[in-house]
Image: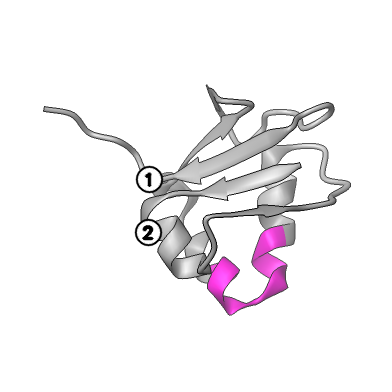
């Protein structure tokens, strides 16, 4: 699946997107796998309350299933004005 990173998440990880092969069943399990990769991922995913996730371009939760998913995106909460 493609994993996309936006705003400060992208800055901490150093990539806008990457292709990941994972056996994770949920977004939360994917995050756990990413955290274990190296320190920059651990820093980006240290506080999940400061992150939002979209699965195939639909706002989702960290317990969302990943079966059949093509894209997961991580980004900070958005504010408007």
- Indicate yes or no whether the magenta region holds residue 36: yes
Marked residue nearer the N-terminal end (2 or 1): 2
Q: Which residue is mark 1?
A: 76
Q: Which residue is rendered at x = 68% and y = 29% of the image?
A: 64
Residue 39: numbered disc:
none
Residue 77 appears left or right of 27: left
- In the rendered image, residue 79, in percent from the top left (x then y), is placed at 22, 33
User: Which image quarter holds the C terminus?
Assistant: top left
Q: Which residue is rendered at x = 74% and y = 47% of the image?
A: 29
Number of numbered callouts drawn: 2
Is residue 43 at least partly visible in the picture? yes
- In the rendered image, residue 23, in percent from the top left (x then y), is placed at 88, 47
**Magenta extent:** 34-42
Is residue 58 positioned above or below 36 on the image? Answer: above
SS class, disc 1: loop
Is residue 46 at least partly visible in the picture? no
Name which quarter of the figure residue 75 lies in: top left
- Are discs 2 and 1 less than 8 Å apart at CB? yes
Q: Which residue is mark 2?
A: 8
User: Which image quarter holds the N terminus?
Assistant: top right
- In the rendered image, residue 28, in percent from the top left (x then y), is placed at 67, 44
SS class, disc 2: helix
């Amino acid at each position: 699946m493609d994993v996309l990173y936006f705003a400060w998440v992208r800055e901490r990880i150093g990539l806008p997107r990457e292709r990941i092969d994972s056996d994770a069943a949920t977004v939360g399990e994917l995050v756990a796998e990413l955290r274990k990769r190296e320190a920059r991922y651990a820093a980006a995913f240290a506080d999940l309350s400061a992150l939002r996730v979209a699965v195939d371009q639909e706002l989702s939760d960290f317990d969302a299933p990943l079966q059949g998913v093509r894209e997961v995106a991580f980004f900070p909460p958005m504010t408007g004005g």
